[in-house]
Image: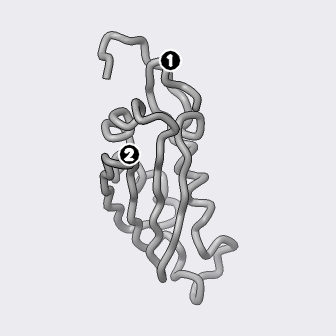
Amino acid sequence: MNDSAILVLVPLHLVAHSRAGDKGNRSNISLIPYRAEVYPYLIEQVSGAKVLALLSPKRASSVIRYELPKLPALNFVIDNALEGGVNDGLCLDVHGKTLSSLLLTLGIKLPGDLIGP
């Protein structure tokens, strides 16, 4: 990371993509940067606590972040964000697929030359 660069706040969707999956009332969301140079900024700025705060309106109870440096990617395992899961929830998105879109709304600060695919 270049500490002397001017950082710009951008939504994650400009620099990364995401996928979501579920099992019962547990969801997982991957976060994969378009460029490997963005990965250290994800590690630094997209914590499990930040994702938990984002999902607090969904009543998520915990988030565990896994770092996958060889990909590079992050994976977040989220408990209780699916209102009981596919068989129990009354939520319109019981599979949690839109949680990945919600994650991509988070802001991240990056040098301007790292913005975009």
Q: Quick check: 70 above or below 41?
A: below
Question: Which picture quadrant has residue 37?
Answer: top left
- Mark 1 sits on what residue? 113
Instruction: Give the amino acid type for the residue marked by disc 2 in the picture.
Output: Pro
- Mark 2 sits on what residue? 72
Disc sitting over residue 15 in the figure:
none
Q: Position of residue 79 (x, y in %)?
A: 40, 71
> Which quarter of the image is occupied by the N terminus?
top left
CA–CA distance between discs 1 and 2? 19 Å
Q: Tag 1: Cα neighbours inside 10 Å, few (<14), some, or many (≥20)? A: few
Q: Where is residue 15 in the image (x, y as percent from the top left)?
A: 53, 35
Q: Is mark 1 on a helix, strand or loop?
A: helix
Instruction: Give the amino acid type for the residue marked by disc 1 in the picture.
Output: Asp
Q: Earlier in the sequence, mark 1 or mark 2?
A: 2
Which of the two discs, 1 and 2, sits closer to the camera?
Answer: 2
Q: Is residue 58 left or right of residue 77?
A: right
Q: Where is residue 42 in the image (x, y as percent from the top left)?
A: 38, 39
Q: Tag 2: Cα neighbours inside 10 Å, few (<14), some, or many (≥20)? A: some
Mark count: 2
